[in-house]
Image: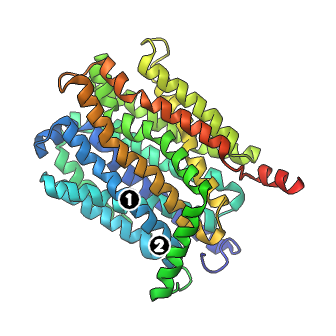
Amino acid sequence: MAASAPGHSGSIGRAAVAAWLLTSVYYFYQYVLRSAPSVMMPQLGDAFGLTAVGVASLVGLFYYGYAPFSLVAGVGMDQLGPRKVIPLGAAVVGVGTLLFATGDSMLGGIGRFLQGAGGVFALIGAVYIATNYLPAAHAATLIGVTQMFGMAGGSAGQFVVGPAIQGGLPWDRFWLIMGLAAFPIAIALFVLMPRSEAPAAGREGLKRAGEAIGAVFRNPQSIMCGLIAGLLFIPTTIFDMVWGIRFLEEAHNMPYSLAVLRSASVPFGWIIGCPLMGWLSDRIGRRKPVIIGAGVVLFACLAFILYGPTGLFPPFTLGLVAGIASGAAMIPYTVIKEVNRPEHSGTATGVINFVNFSVTALLGPVFARLLVRASDGGDRELVHYQATFSPLLIGVGIAILLTFALTESGPAGRLRRAHN
């Protein structure tokens, strides 16, 4: 656990808030990098000599780094403390971004992997600081606000970067600038990050790390939390952030500039939805009703986006509401910490992130192949996108059903069980 009785000193509390805010800014930064490729797919295809599907696979390497290093980041928080691992993660993102800027397919692939491997320390670090150094009564709200920073970066990666690329900013210059920006962030993180107690070293430390991972994975509630989060999340990570702009251009003949704005409305909805869903969950003291209700809304929005008539809703409405509803995907990040031992706080966050983004890493190439198969490798139309992405509806439905099997870990649920 964190050292020095976190939360008992005003100075420690202020330092923790500053560290959490800066780590959330780091999360904003890495989310810009995560979503930016969606607005420069043609430029990346020309630079790397790849088809649109090939670029999607290259971009998807982010999640092959992000998912497994979730476990490394989570265990690192528990065993070493945030000061020793979060700044290192930011520096790794910088190196990966500079490699991606080279335009070489091999170096770019390695760079994209490193962006994911280092980027995961942002979310897990911010969640760790929020739940170990700041008031526990606001856990879901704080985690929601953390994700709000991330999705603000996701929106900026489309809403801001898209017009810049269209206005003539070379794609490689963007990645060069963003890569160099990582190193001041890493230095600032090291300076502001709270110190932790000396961890167990050598074999004892590895043994404790292995025991923590095993304990969290053996808890069925942990796996369900990861699957629920992943199934509610992939409409954003795969459909919107990889194929959203192409979907609007090819299936609805929408101009590029407008497609960028429409696609960016989904992560903008997360900016609203993540803290709102977390606050609502803390307010009523329950987790499951919020996840289930939001899941139903997300299902309806996806169905209308894929199959509904155009013009039925005002512009940006469906994307915005879908983003708000899918913000409930962060509530399982609170649940998994509440159904596991407190000393496994960082590890639990790592495990849910691992399961969550393993779903994205594994399914991203599958959806790309399905889209190629549906269109026979030719021009893509609405029917091809419908055939490819309709399984997202099944995934959201499964997430809703799995939520019914979750233990209600909110304060009201725990109080009710204590009285029975």
Q: Residues within 10 Å of mark 1 (few under 14, many from 20)?
A: many
- Report the front residue among 200 and 18: 200
Question: In the drawing, what numbered circle is on residue 119?
Answer: 1
Disc 1 vs disc 2: which is toward the camera?
A: 2
- Report the amino acid beneath label 1: Gly
Q: Position of residue 381 (x, y in %)?
A: 27, 19
Tell me where residue 276 sits by quadrant: top right
Q: Position of residue 205 (x, y in %)?
A: 49, 83
Task: Tell me: residue 259, above or below residue 219.
Answer: above
Q: Position of residue 80 (x, y in %)?
A: 49, 78
Task: Tell me: residue 300, above or below residue 119.
Answer: above
Query: Viewed as shown, does residue 337 lie left or right of 161?
Result: right
Query: Viewed as shown, does residue 2 lie left or right of 38?
Result: right
Residue 135 appears in view: yes
Instruction: Name the secondary structure under disc 1.
Output: helix
First-in-chain label (1 vs 2)? 2
Q: Real-space Cα distance between discs 1 and 2?
A: 14 Å
- Report the front residue among 171 and 237: 237
Residue 160 appears in view: no
Question: In the drawing, what numbered circle is on residue 76?
Answer: 2
Instruction: Name the secondary structure under disc 2.
Output: helix
- Report the amino acid beneath label 2: Gly
User: Which quadrant does the N terminus fall into?
Assistant: bottom right
Query: Viewed as shown, does residue 238 lie left or right of 312?
Result: left
Tell me where residue 294 sits by quadrant: top right
